[in-house]
Structure formats: C-alpha cells, structure tokens
Image (tube, rainbow, N blue to C red):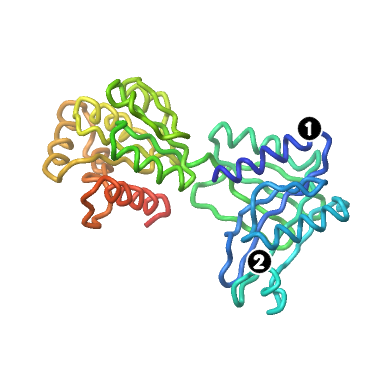
Amino acid sequence: MHGVDLEVLASCVQWRAQGHRVLLVTVVKTWGSSPRPAGAMLALRDDGLAVGSVSGGCIEDDLMARVGAQGIAAQRPEQVTYGVSADEARRFGLPCGGALQLVCEPVGEHSGVEALLQAVQQRRLVARRLVLATGEAALEPAARDEALHFDGETLRTVHGPRWRLIVIGAGQLSKFLCRIALGLDFEVIVCDPRSEYRDTWDVDGVALTRSMPDDVVTEMRPDERTAVVALTHDPKLDDLALMEALRSRAFYVGALGSRRNNDARRARLMEHFGLSAAEVGRLHGPVGLDIASRTPPEIAVSIAAQVVAVKNGR
C-alpha cells in the first residue's frame, strides 16, 4: 500500500471519530489511458475536504463540488463512471478514449475501515470485500499477487503494508538512493553504526539507526514488501545484514561491489555463516541494473530501478 492510501484510510477513521460523514471513493476499472490505476482511493468529508486522488484533479474537483453542495446523502455504495463520451472526457481532462469507473461508498459502522487501517498498520496483507447492496464489508486473507476484483455487486480490494527499504550504510550513494526511494513512496530505514557517516546524514524523512546491521534486520523482520540493500563496502557490516536478510522473506536483497567481490561474498556467506546455496542465490550482486552507471546518482538510479523491477515482477 502506498503512503497516500494509508493516509486516506487514516483520514476516514479520524473524520468519523470527529462526527463527520465520509465518502470513500475507489477506482474499480479504467479504459484507455488513466491518470490513476484501479485501487486508487479518495476520502471526501461532508464539508468537501478531500485526501487522496482518483484522477489528475478534475474528477476530484467534481466530486468535491457535489459533496460541498449536497453533502453525503447516499446510504449505500454507488457506481459512477466518468469519460464515457468524448465531451465528458475533455471536460474531466481524461486522455482521448480514457474513462474510469468509481465506487463511492458512504463509510459507516459496517464498513470496517478501522479494522482495515489497523491490519495495514500491523503490516498484514488482507482483502476487503464490500457488498454494494448492503454496504457491509469484511476482511479476508489475501495473496501478494491478487488484484482488485469488481463484478458490479461485490468489490474486493487488496491492502497491505507500505513498501519498505532498509539501507545498510549512510554514505553518499545511500543519500541519493534514499531520496529516490522516498519519491517512490517507500518507507526508508538507514542503518550505520559508524558515527563519521551518521553525523553528516542530511536526508529528511528517513529513519536513521546506529545499531549493528544484523540486529536491525532481525528487529525489522523483513517481509514480502521489504527490500534490503547493503552499501557500506565493508564486509564486517554488509555481511551481517545480508546473512539475516537472505534468510528472511524480503522480496529483494542486494549488495554493492564488483562481480569478483560478490562471488567472494557468496562463498563467505555459505562457508562462515551457514547459508544455503538457494539462500545465497537470492542475492542481487553486483546490485542494480546495468545502465553503465558511474556516478553515485547514476548508481542509485540503477539500484532503485532494479528494486522496482523485482517488486513489479519483472
């Protein structure tokens, strides 16, 4: 789940606790080009305040204007489609041939948004099944590769923890990689026990810890939405993190270094740390896509691109 979607759920819960009526809008289908994918969410308060997005802005404006003028009168979820005609597509800023279908759901006692927010905050992967005829929703187990499903009567959306990146080392390369990862909406944690690197860290929005790398990885318990990248070039630090990361469920584990250095690292991990060939085979090293990168910013781009590629199943 992206940070903005988490904010949408948190806003729904907070606004309801304050006594407001809330409308949760979800993109359920798109045709042609669309600014936001299926699953994108928007929360609308009864006074027109909004968090999140379902388009480039024009549809949000229309929805906010409707709520501002009429309030939230609906008692059951409704389907709304934008961009069916060429005139409407132009009016709402949709690309030629683009259209999107929304489910607009008044959030109530049976919506289960509070339970959904709690599950996501606990880093659980769940599906929310909404019956449009009644407005009742329930949480169900979900698989990582499941997608949104809507058949006109039932909407099933999949929600999981925010994607997370653990970086070992607080050097110059890490700074560029962390800035890119923040822009990609990852939660970013940097670990470096070396004070000479921590004291010059200047990237806002990143959690910085001085603990030893193996302790950090063990404590963070990497799951299927966590990537671990070791960038210190110091085997005493990188190998400790990799030892734990390769045994975890992290979807991506990478290490900086040449092919020769990474071959030697793989041998160390098996000989001295007891990792299996299958566990060591998960290591991306040299880390990053081959884009002939030379400078720290270019190397950071190559690493981020490879992490996103693996995340998206490429």
Residue 184, x across and y down, in percent:
46, 48
Q: Is residue 184 above or below residue 215?
A: below
Which residue type does callout 2 highlight? Leu
- Badge 1 marks a residue whose secondary structure is helix
Image quarter in which the N terminus is found: top right
Residue density around tag 2, few if under 14, some if 14–19, many if 20 or more, within 10 Å: many
- Badge 2 marks a residue whose secondary structure is strand
Residue 239 shown left or right of residue 32 in the figure: left
Rendered residue at 62%/58% (across/down)? 149
- Name the residue that disc number 2 marks: 100
Measure how far apart labels 1 and 2 are at the Cα level: 31 Å
Residue 220, x across and y down, in percent:
42, 28
Which residue type does callout 1 highlight? Ala
Q: Which mark is residue 117?
A: none
* First reached walking from the N terminus: tag 1 or tag 2: 1
Image quadrant in which you'd find residue 197: top left
Q: Nearer the viewer, residue 139 or 208?
A: 208
Residue 79 shown left or right of residue 95 in the figure: right
- Name the residue that disc number 1 marks: 17
Image quadrant in which you'd find residue 225: top left
Rendered residue at 71%/78% (across/down)? 87
Rendered residue at 63%/33% (across/down)? 118
Residue 185, x across and y down, in percent:
49, 45
Marks 2 and 1: in contact by CB < 8 Å? no
Image quadrant in which you'd find residue 188: top left
Rendered residue at 67%/73% (across/down)? 89
